Amino acid sequence: MQIPFFSPRKPAATPYQQEFFLGFRDGFPIALGYIPVSFAFGLLAVKGGLPAWVATLISLTNLTSAGQFAGTNLILAGASLLEITFTTLIINLRYLLMSLSLAQKLAPGLTFRERSLMAFGITDETFAVASVARAEISFPYMLGLITGPYLGWGTGTLLGGLVCTLLPANLQEALGITLYAMFIALVVPPAKKSRAISLIIAVAVGISSALAWLPGLRLLSEGWRITIATIVACLFGAAFFPRKEVSK
């Protein structure tokens, strides 16, 4: 007589878990892309004199990419707190607009704590995915979406800091070029496709160069030069290349 084989049935995932894992799946490619960028940040921070754990703590409490690079450079340069605050505020101001946009698609009934946690995890990439993938954004989905990129950003920073700590000084200097290569890779492709982006980049570079080299203007610190160049380039783009209204 054959005894039937009974396997224990796994409990079905709850709707909360299903939403979380769906978001985690959508955010996993972002996490992989963040690792090399944050690795370069870890190298830069440790090479500048910060301990690896401090660089990692910065990544885990900021998650702001360009603003984080600029802010850390100012810290290493000994800039004032006002200068660091104002520079990072200007650079990260786009996240305010992204949050306002996503707020129109949030599921009803979210608490202030849930909204705050979702806002903390908004980056350019998670915003793009959430905007396109969902008609209504739930808390578990957004939590899953930001978990992977958050861990990838922190892990990459820690690895970059540890590698820089273990490498000899000459190799640390050689790896410093990865930061410039990364920014070239980010800027050149969109500039080749859009005349507007090319001109805005040219204006930003021109203003930054003038502030760095012209007599009198070069007395400004690095943070204020970044701030002024950013504001002028944005105003130039808004004035000469406004977004066209899409007719319905």
Image (cartoon, rainbow, N blue to C red):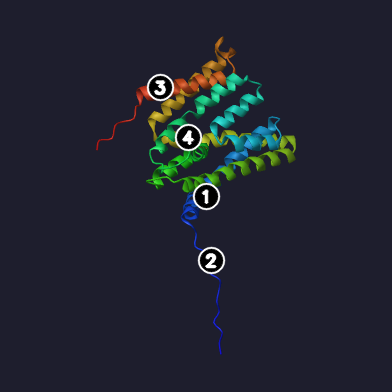
| First reached walking from the N terminus: tag 3 or tag 4 | 4
Badge 1 amino acid:
Phe
Q: Position of residue 3 (x, y in %)?
A: 56, 84
Question: Amino acid type of disc 3?
Answer: Phe
What is the spatial separation of the Cα atoms under label 4 and label 1, in whole angstroms? 25 Å
Q: Quadrant of residue 177?
A: top right
Cα gap from disc 2 to disc 3, whole angstroms? 59 Å
Distance in Å between CA atoms under marks 3 and 4: 19 Å
Q: Quadrant of residue 242?
A: top left
Q: Earlier in the sequence, mark 2 or mark 3?
A: 2
Which residue corresponds to mark 1?
A: 28
For mark 2, give the secondary structure.
Answer: loop
Eyeballing the image, is 27 above or below 115? Answer: below
| Residue 78 rendering spot, x and y as whole percentages | 66, 21
Is disc 2 surrounded by few (<14), some (14 to 19) or many (20+) residues within 10 Å? few
Tell which circle, 2 or 1, labels the residue nearer the N-terminal end.
2
Kindly identify the residue that appears in the image at 39 percent across and 25 percent down. 237
Q: Amino acid at mark 2?
A: Lys
Sequence-first tag of 4 and 2? 2
- Residue that mark 3 sits on: 236
Cα distance, mark 2 to mark 1? 25 Å
> Residue 104 location in percent, x, y?
38, 38
Towards the viewer: 185 or 108: 108
